[in-house]
Image (cartoon, rainbow, N blue to C red):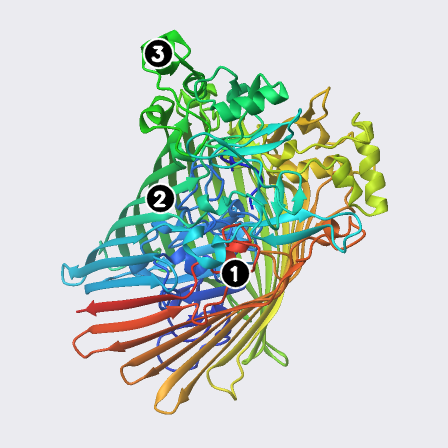
Amino acid sequence: MLTIKKSVLCLAIGSVMTTAPVAVAAEEDNSEVERIEVTGSRIFREGAIAPSPVTVITAETLLSTGATNIGDALNELPALATTFSLASSGGSSIGTAGLNLLDLRGMGTARTLVLVNGKRHVGGFAGVASVDVNTIPTEWVESVEIVTGGASAVYGADAVTGVVNFRLKEDIVGLNVNGQYGMADDSDFENYRVALSYGADFADGRGNAAISIEYAEQNELNALDRDQTAISRRHLTNPEDAATVRTWYDNAGIWAINNAGVVGFYGGVPGFYSFNPDGTPVPQGTGTITDGISCAGENCDFVNLNEWVNLQPEFDRTTVNFKTNYDVTDNLNAYFEAKWSQTNSLNNFQPAFFFFDPENTLITRDNAYITPELGELMDQTGAGYVVVNRFMNDLGPRLEDNKREMQRYVLGLQGIVMDDWDLDAYAIYGETKQTRKNLNNLIFSKFRQSIDAVFDDAGNIVCRDAEAQAAGCVPSSLFGEGGVSPEAAAWFSTTTVADSKVSQYVAGASLANAALFELPAGAVGVATGIEYRKEKSESNEDPFAATGDTFFNALQPESGSFDVSEIYGEISVPLLADIPLIDSLVVDGAVRYADYETVGGVTSWKVGLDWTVYQDLRVRSTVSTALRAPNIGEFYGAKSQNFFNVDDSCKSSELAALEPETRAIRAANCAALGIPADFDSDYDSASIEGVSGGNDELKEEKSDSFTVGFAYQPSYVEGMSLTVDYWQIEIEDAIASVGAQDIIDRCVDSTTGIDNQWCALITRDADNYEITNLEQIVQNVAKQEASGVDIELAYDFALFSGDMRTNLIATYLIDRDEFPFQDEPDQKEEYAGTIGEANWQAQLNLAYDINNWNINWKTRYIEEVDVYTPQFAGQFDKPYSDIMTWGTYFVSDALVQYSFANGLSVGVGIDNLFDRDLPRTTSGTGTGSASYDNIGRFYYLTARFEM
């Protein structure tokens, strides 16, 4: 994702939850056994036996929360990472605020395939196929199914880490009106949701039609609105003899820039000064603890960057859904679905700023706003000018207003043909349009005209440039907060507008037969199908912003498209049955061939083994290979201006903190780059300019997956089930956009020297050795690996006069490794056990029903995590920081509901019941840190009426 120009460095069984694999065998009776479509296979089966590990979560469980969208509820599951939740979607990325994208295993949203009723859905953002789940109709969700083994061959090659399928309710009859309102305990944050759904049968029950309307809204939550996140903290470098390389300090920050302006004098009266509102200078305190431009302790005049941090964006969404189906014959049903959704999000960023930028904030001695006191300082030091470091807060924060409109239509025919073949033929069209407005966008040329102010002959302060005067230039002062009048702000700022459109066309058909013919061990099932898909994406950037004359990134328009034709087949063959230790033994196979316009033909396949040892115990395993083609943004993305917050690894101050072996490797590589040993600078305290973009030379990535596990449902304990599954994923030639800091580090960390793919992306100034450009393009990175164990335990039982339902879902992450160098496969970065990649994560759900009462309890658990990877921490001969870990994290939610006989039910809930704080050093808005609640204790009320 492109990063907006920033400031200096910133900071199971039952209705609660079910697991599909637990139903090992259907009870024997004389009734007809239902034919069930199980996610993980396109073959309709007798009973609910799934060939791959599948987790099924009911809508009741997901909506037992104060969250007003289903995506944030799903992101609390251990298998999903919070890559794009509402909390983490804004940050510094452009155009992403308000998105909610799912990321299984934390290996990238592009590798998680999201389906609705088993079918493709249009992407939510330009250049990607990832679905914005904010557009899913919450009111109609019946369950969410997560498949994590061998899904690519069955559903599509981009299901590298798995599939999340939203199964919607089928025939909807009656009226349902519900609402929810919630408010935070320690801030003014609040949200609400209202929904209406109505459906009815027609034509004597042969048809059904339904409509739903849903609206949800939340206001902005700023970091200063909460005591915990309002504190300005800074990570300062310690003296060499200290116990750690760096230390976190509260009430600390950057002194070298603020909202009033900071200037420095290096002559006869050295020192740094800021300004009172009247423009008179005042000494700038640099603290008793100083680290370059940062300080802590007494007399530290720091700026609190949290002023511009959004914990939650202002956000609203509206969805309107219509669906109908009609039995055209006794065996065939025609269906039609239509959906329209609009989401709006408003996110704020730091205002335009200037940091050691003489090109834009050099003020000469004759400037009309230089007070006598400032002039005296300049004269004493012989300075003919000053360069002002300043946040343009009186211009207002940079605001990004994103509006997304999505529509999707599905037309299909399903049923039984040729006696016993299950048919589903369909056509889909979907599109997402986005309009992005960037407000308070500073215009460089007009800004320079405005601050270059002089006295005219009448003693009035005017812009020096006569042509600018004639055009309406309004002068302004950089000395003191409030020096920019509304009229001046209007002169040198603008609102830039960009728009994009993503469209998707899909046509396909599948046939399945669960009993094509009989073998001694049972029936052979098959499924086959074809699908054609075309994806298009186009982004049109503001032509004025693209010139580079505004503070906003100079983004370039981009467009691309591809089509893919696919054919697939699946078979289930029973090998053995009804012999000792083998109640049944079934082999499943699937293969999918896809012909992409971009990379050509690729083949994905899966082989699975399903062994029922006896009625209570079932063992299953899958082996699969998938090849994922690059998406439109990865392949066609234009190279556009970007800004990166990094540390230059070749600075002597950075090298000095390393342990000897790592220091020797880096120092040698830095020297090979021509950088002298004494090179040091604070230039990287501000963001570094570069470009980001796609790469039309990408090839497909290959992934190999393996799962093995068991499902145990003891007949002697009614209502209990246990599933345990080991999983392993390996991706070669992984398509990825590597982080800017990783590019710098990997350039100088290679034991084979600087002739590598990373050093080629960095440009340095030949005179001062500072990085002047960094190219971040999508590449086929060497390899990624991940493995772990999923555990699900469910137990339902009668308790007193009610029913108790319990479910525990846990994931143990064994490995999560990335290999940066194509020619050094043994060198890797280990992420398991770090922020967002905890070794252990779990969720416990308890539900108790008694009479008209329903009580729900949920507890999430995240094990203690390391802040740094072993490889990063191992570079230093002492602990890198005084905070090396984030502690074990528990957060609990509770909901109590009461149902009246007239169809009305009401409830009261509390999320984060015990008001668990964030880890000290985070705002909970990062890709990994968003797993930690940044709202605090949250109260909410619910009401529902059904008839």
Q: Nearer the viewer, mark 2 or mark 3?
A: 3
Q: Earlier in the sequence, mark 3 or mark 1?
A: 3
Q: Earlier in the sequence, mark 1 or mark 2?
A: 2
Q: Is residue 580 above or below residue 812?
A: below
Which one is in front, 711 or 215?
215
- Residue 40 makes an appearance in the image: no
Tag 1's secondary structure?
loop
Q: Nearer the viewer, mark 1 or mark 2?
A: 1
Which residue matches tag 2? Answer: 345
Would you identify the image quadrant in which residue 853 lies?
bottom left
Q: Earlier in the sequence, mark 2 or mark 3?
A: 2
Which residue matches tag 3? Answer: 469
- Give the alpha-carbon distance from disc 2 to disc 3, as whole Å: 38 Å
* Residue 436 on image: x %, y %: 37, 34
Amino acid carrying mark 3 in the image: Gln
Q: Which mark is residue 918?
A: 1
Which one is in front, 247 or 214?
247
Within 10 Å of the Cα at label 2, are there few (<14), some (14-19), or many (20+) other Cα atoms? many
Q: Is residue 55 above or below residue 470?
A: below
